[in-house]
Amino acid sequence: MSLETLDLGDGLRTSPQGFGAMALTAVYGGTDPDSALATLEHAVDVGVTFVDTANVYGNGTNEELVGRLLVTRPGAVQVATKFGVSGNIRVGERAARGDAPYVHECAEESLRRLGTDVIDLYYLHRVDTRVPIEETVGAMAELVAQGKVRHLGLSEVTADELRRAHAVHPIAAVQSEWSIWSRDVERHVVPTAAELGVGFVPYSPLGRGFLAGSVGTTIPEGDMRRTFPRFDADNLDANQVVVQAVRAVAEDAGVTPAQVALAWVHAQSARWGLPVVPIPGTRRAERVDENLGALSVRLDAAALAALDEVSGAVVGGRSADPTWVSAGRE
């Protein structure tokens, strides 16, 4: 099966919906590598060509998993990976690093784990505020010149950081959290990306499962969601109003809550005038099919208005450290 591709940015063509492979690593509980690979293979078989990973997911094991996919589906996938975060993200221990030698070191390690000669899209995962972004992106541009990377991306950058980076080398995509309950990027980052011709890749478009109604009233031990303020017990309960609104729209439209949440994200492409390719993640093949079903869902004006209104009722920040995301540095 194939899906119509689109130009994300800088000539990078991808499927209109990607796959976020982080969920296949033990960040939301344990995983089975063979089952994870089967889910990835299914995603590609039903038309997904854009797979997102990072060197920090599973301490490199997620990239190795994607590398196994590249063996079974050669030439079928555009791989995006990232560098620039060190530490254990599963428990909220993390730091940013972006000096030039580190850029090259991380790229070589990712190429080895992925088992490939070139990375389609290489992201700076988080900005190291101790290093001028021009230095970091300049080193990334050297990777393009060397043929080791095809396109450059940035994750959780401010509008100013995006402009400065884009002046050094064309940026194909910005990846940041963007969903019904995470809309701070609309203030500055999204308009700047649209102005510069940079595509947008929303991560956690389902609110880490919350908008799909798959999160209970408590988060188990070992689940990375415990590190996010909006998943605190009191906030989680208060935010059920958002889930209820999504569910109501889904019932009216005859689709699932996950499809409504993704359809809302896809609708932002027309609203803001830029390519938008969300990367929902899942461990189950049937959820891949459900998520792709959102591509045929068109929310009417009343549904969009209802979802826009409830997005303002969200309680709790999306990061325990406000400066870890773009809104905290704008």
Image: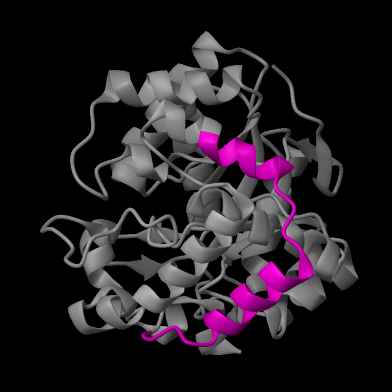
Q: Is residue 54 magenta?
A: no
**Left or right for 272, reference 280:** right
Indicate the quadrant containing the N terminus: top left, top right, bottom left or bottom right. top right
**Scheme of image coloration:** one colour
Expressed as whole percent of the image width and height from the top left, the position of residue 218 reads 16, 66
- Which one is nearer the viewer's eye here, 304 or 148? 304
> Please, which residue is most extreme toward the left here?
221
Q: Is residue 237 above or below residue 154?
A: below
Res 244 visible:
yes
Q: Residue at x 43, y 55 (%)?
A: 212
Prevalent SS, magenta region: helix
In percent of the image, x 59 and y 48: which residue is there? Answer: 254
Q: Quadrant of the C terminus?
A: bottom right
Q: In which quarter of the image is residue 301?
A: bottom right
Place of residue 174 in the rendered image (x, y in percent of width and height, measured from the top left) = 67, 61
Image height of 245 relative to 33, above or below = below
Stretch of the chain drawn in magenta: 290-316
Horizontal relation, residue 56 to residue 278: left or right: left
**53 to the left or right of 2:** left
Quarter of the image holding residue 138? bottom right
Instruction: State the image coordinates of residue 19 (x, y, percent, origin top left).
Output: 54, 39
Where residue 315 sits: x, y (%)? 38, 86
Q: Residue furthest front?
A: 252
